[in-house]
Image (cartoon, rainbow, N blue to C red):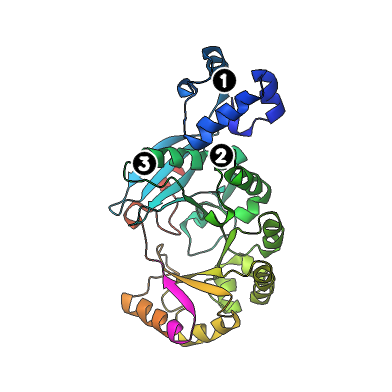
Amino acid sequence: MDSIISIDIEILNNILEKSYRKKQIDHFLYKKATLSFDFMYNLPKDIRELLKNKFKILSLKLEKESKSIDGTIKFLFRLDDDNFIESVYLKDINNRITFCISSQVGCRMGCIFCKTGEMGFKRNLTVSEIVSQVLYMFSIMKSDSDVIDTSFNIVFMGMGEPLDNFDNVVEAIKIFIDKEKFGLSQNRITISTCGIIDKIIPLTEKFPNINIALSLITANQEKRDKIMPISKKFSIYDIVTILKEYYNRRKNRITLEYVMIKDFNIGKDDIELLRKFKKEIFHINLIPLNFESEFCKKPSENEIKYFYKVLLKKGFIVTIRYKRGEDINGACGMLFSKEHFT
């Protein structure tokens, strides 16, 4: 059974006979987060029954929900082919909501500091599977009595490399920004990439105000080659060149995600190499390592603060992004559920 999210408008209009029915359905889905046709009360009963018999709303089912002591919620979703993905619902102290969503089952990038990379790549998510994550978490947000502002942010920072699933991600973003649907501003959406930089300009030509976050990790080419296979295809020089071009189009700072790894990328030489990333263009987001392995260890709190303070003194715009949802394996780089991905 197909998800109504991905049904062609003309086909749906032919089935429903009256074109305004589609707008009624969209209103229930994307404005009210109604996840059952039974509750679309301004549709005639026969139309609701028709929809139930022909379509489903979501292209996934909740398998498990895990709630952190800090309020973060991680969702394990089962897809129709019995693959699994994870998504994360984040609420900060000001009740600002962010949905961290996945774009692939697994990931082919193989970054050794990221747990998802251990899964390897299984497949791209469809448009309806990407949108279904947001719809589900939107329904959670709508039911949260503490949340007054119904606006939210979307970050493609879950499982997978979004620019490796370019076409489906683009179509999902169109749904997110459609005024008849979610109606999000482009600047509420962030695409995080490990470095598929040849897709950045095509993406930003379609969505000029979308946010780009690059997983830099290190500005040392040799080091980056060791931990991020994509670096062998796109060099630091390539990255700087394309991101400057992007900045010149938008004039808004680009985020550099810098996962801090002990005895690897937090020395004085690493700071010096960051100078090639101009301070007026880039904002450095320091992320203390969440996923440890035999190759990557967490730095101490003192090491984190020292590196941060030195960058500040050098004039960089820098923040430390402390972990959210670590106790439920929901923090950055930790999305992987061993019992479901064997």
Label 3: how many residues lie within 10 Å, few (<14), some (14-19) or many (20+)? Answer: some
Q: Disc 1 or 3, which lies upstream in sequence?
A: 1
Q: Which mark is residue 129?
A: 2
Question: Looking at the picture, does residue 70 appear above or below residue 318?
Answer: above
Q: Disc 2 or 1, which lies upstream in sequence?
A: 1
For the N terminus, the quadrant is top right
Q: Is residue 200 visible?
A: yes
Q: Disc 3 or 2, which lies upstream in sequence?
A: 3
Residue type indicated by callout 3: Glu
Residue type indicated by callout 1: Leu
Mark 3 near mark 2, Cβ–Cβ under 8 Å?
A: no
Residue 202 on image: x %, y %: 72, 58
**341 and 217: which one is in front?**
217
- The structure residue drawn at horizontal position 60% and vertical position 53%, both measured from the top left corner, is 162
Label 1: how many residues lie within 10 Å, few (<14), some (14-19) or many (20+)? Answer: some
Task: Give the alpha-carbon distance from disc 3 to disc 2, as whole Å.
Answer: 18 Å
Q: Of the residues tagged 2 and 1, which is closer to the observer?
A: 1
Residue type indicated by callout 2: Glu
Query: Is residue 181 left or right of 262 when viewed as pictured?
Result: right
Task: Give the alpha-carbon distance from disc 2 to disc 1, as whole Å.
Answer: 19 Å
**317 and 222: which one is in front?**
317
Q: Find the magenta span and give its range.
A: 311-321
Q: Quadrant of residue 200?
A: bottom right
